[in-house]
Every structure is written in structure tokens, then in C-alpha cells.
Image (spheres, rainbow, N blue to C red):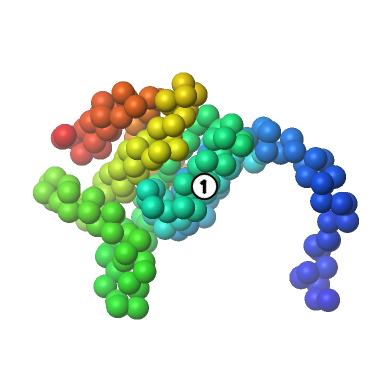
């Protein structure tokens, strides 16, 4: 066996005993962190959240898709099994996925997955053109993408069900700036269905100055 794999040891405990012995690890989870796979900085580093208190879920550009069973089942697991009461959607400036739209036929799967992002770009196209700097336009698109995904999250059946059952659940949108290593609050906090549109308007206004 190579030295690379000698560090790893198999679990010798019977599986039920191992699960019981480590049950406290999931019982302490307080946050669900939804991020982009292009960002390699962990929330434990960004926010100082202890590792045992956060469940991390990532995909391309942190998209929330209502037909994505992987995402929806993860949300159900986080809420109904772990009892998570706060979800953070965190984007990051200088994301490679925001640089340009996929153009190669070989990337049709990526292009399909990122279609909602392209729709966001088109939705706010005229407002983004106000910003003369291409870098600043990308930053604003990044913020708008986070805002849109928080709204998508709020409208999932899993989240709606928690609120209908009067279960405490808060959704928040953040963006990480690698250049200065700062996490910015996008002023979108949703704790009930009635909060969705007011929070959306406030966040868009805060980001690009209009709604």
C-alpha cells in the first residue's frame, strides 16, 4: 500500500455502534451552507462557524432548481432530520462561471444547468450596463444571482412546508470577496412567506439601486 493511503484506517466498530458514537456530530448542526463549487474557501474559515455546526452543500453557481431531487432531498434531510433553522446562500466575486456564458457544444450540460443564471443576466441587462466597469458588472451579477437563488429557495415546497408548520427557518444571502477576504451581507433575510417580496425588493435596491 502506498504511503498516501496508509494514513486512512477502516472503521472497525460495528456500523450501528459507529453511528451512535458519532450522533452528536449531526445533532449540533445549526446551519446549511449552500455555495458554489468554484469557491474553495469553507464557511468554517469565512464565518468562523465550527465544523460540527454546519452542513455544506455545493453545486455550480449555487443554483436552486425545483426539479433537482438531489437538492430537494438534501433540504428535506437538513430540516426534518437535522433540524437546521438557518440556511445561507453564499456566492463569491470573480467566479469563473460568471466570466462568460458557455459557448462550446461540448459544454451543453453546463450551459443547461446555468440557464437560470443567464436569465438573471438578461433580466437585469439594462441595469447592469449602468456600471461601466466589466468587473463591477460581474460583481453585481454575482449578487443578483445569490438574491435570485434565495428567492428560489424560499419558494421550494420543502421550505414552504416548514413555514406552514410554523417551524423556525431563516434564509440569508451573502457574497464573499476574495480580494479583501470579506463576506458581504446582501440584505436579504427571509423568515416567512410574507417576507419574500419585501426582502427581494430591498436586496435588489441595495445591490443595483433600482427595483
In the foreground, 169 or 15: 15
Residue 71 at x, y = what percent?
47, 50
| Residue 158 to residue 38: above or below | above
Q: Name the secondary structure under disc 1.
A: helix
Q: Residue at x 76, y 70 (%)?
A: 4
Quadrant of the rendering where the C terminus is positioned: top left
Q: Is 60 displayed left or right of 139 in the figure? A: right
| Residue 191 to residue 22: above or below | above
| Residue 180 to residue 110: above or below | above
Residue 23 at x, y = what percent?
75, 38
Residue carrying label 1: 73
Q: Residue at x 37, y 36 (%)?
A: 154
In the foreground, 193 or 208: 193
Classify 10 Å Cα crowding around label 1: few (below 14), some (14-19), many (20 and above): few
Q: Is 197 displayed left or right of 185 in the figure? A: left
Residue 144 at x, y = what percent?
28, 44
Residue farthest along the top direction in this orientation:
166
Residue 101 at x, y = what percent?
27, 65
Q: Quadrant of residue 197?
A: top left
| Residue 172 to residue 117: above or below | above
Q: Residue at x 35, y 37 (%)?
A: 155
Q: Does the rendering let one see residue 146? A: no
Q: Quadrant of residue 196?
A: top left
Amino acid at each position: 500500500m502506498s504511503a498516501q493511503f496508509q494514513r486512512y484506517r477502516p472503521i472497525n466498530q460495528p456500523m450501528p455502534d459507529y453511528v451512535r458514537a458519532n450522533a452528536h456530530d449531526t445533532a449540533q448542526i445549526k446551519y446549511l451552507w449552500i455555495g458554489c463549487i468554484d469557491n474553495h474557501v469553507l464557511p468554517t474559515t469565512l464565518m468562523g462557524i465550527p465544523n460540527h455546526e454546519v452542513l455544506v452543500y455545493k453545486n455550480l453557481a449555487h443554483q436552486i432548481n425545483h426539479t433537482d431531487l438531489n437538492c430537494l432531498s438534501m433540504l428535506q434531510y437538513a430540516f426534518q432530520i437535522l433540524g437546521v433553522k438557518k440556511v445561507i446562500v453564499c456566492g463569491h466575486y470573480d467566479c469563473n462561471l460568471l466570466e462568460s456564458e458557455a459557448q462550446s457544444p461540448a459544454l451543453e450540460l453546463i450551459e443547461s444547468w446555468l440557464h437560470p443564471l443567464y436569465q438573471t443576466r438578461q433580466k437585469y441587462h439594462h441595469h447592469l450596463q449602468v456600471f461601466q466597469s466589466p468587473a463591477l458588472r460581474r460583481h453585481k451579477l454575482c449578487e443578483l444571482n445569490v438574491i435570485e437563488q434565495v428567492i428560489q429557495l424560499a419558494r421550494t415546497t420543502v421550505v414552504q412546508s416548514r413555514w406552514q408548520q410554523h417551524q423556525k427557518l431563516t434564509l440569508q444571502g451573502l457574497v464573499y470577496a476574495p480580494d479583501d477576504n470579506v463576506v458581504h451581507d446582501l440584505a436579504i433575510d427571509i423568515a416567512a412567506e410574507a417576507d419574500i417580496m419585501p426582502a427581494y425588493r430591498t436586496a435588489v435596491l441595495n445591490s443595483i439601486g433600482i427595483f
